[in-house]
Amino acid sequence: MTVLVDLPAARPGRLAQVLAATALGAATGDFQTFLRGARAEPLPDGIRLRVRLDVHTIARFADLVRVEADGLAFWSFRVLADPPECWLEVTGAGDAGALARTVFGALGA
């Protein structure tokens, strides 16, 4: 397994409290293309999504995560891959972890 992205949260988790899950759902809409049908596994501080993607799609997905992580800086992002398997872990402190489960869990459905 290879770690392609490992970006820790740059902002405190408490900032996630001021954002509604619906607003974040709109901000994370680009992820849905890659995560549709993903299997979700709750983590104590967030969520792990597992999906099957080809190597080129995994690379595009990793690029998307790197770009979007700047605007969602209260979450930590990790992308791991063992093609064709790919995992996205989104975690955060306090309420940010629960919000990650809500927002990203809905994307995988």
Image (cartoon, rainbow, N blue to C red):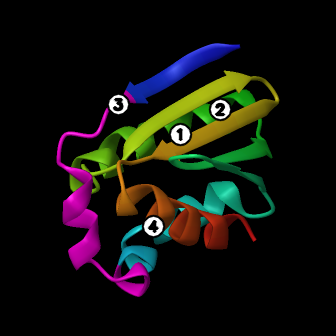
Q: Which residue is mark 1?
A: 60
Q: Which residue is mark 3?
A: 7
SS of the residue under disc 3: strand
Location of residue 28 by image quarter: bottom left
Residue at the spot x=55%, y=32% of the render?
79
Label 3 vs label 4, nearer the camera: 4
Asked whether 8 falls inside the magenta stretch, the response is: yes
The disc, 3 or 1, on the residue closer to the chain's N-terminal end is 3
Secondary structure beneath dot 1 equals helix
The answer to which of 1 and 60 lies nearer the viewer is 1
Residue type, numbered disc 4: Leu
Front of the two marks 4 and 1: 4
The numbered mark at residue 99 is 4
Estimate the spatial distance between the alpha carbons at disc 2 and disc 4, rounded to whole Å: 29 Å
What amino acid is labelled 1 in the image?
Arg
CB under 8 Å between callouts 1 and 2?
A: yes
The C terminus, quarter of image: bottom right
Identify which amino acid the numbered label 2 is placed on.
His
First in residue order: circle 4 vs circle 1:
1
The type of residue carrying mark 3 is: Leu
- Residue 90, image x and y in percent? 50, 46
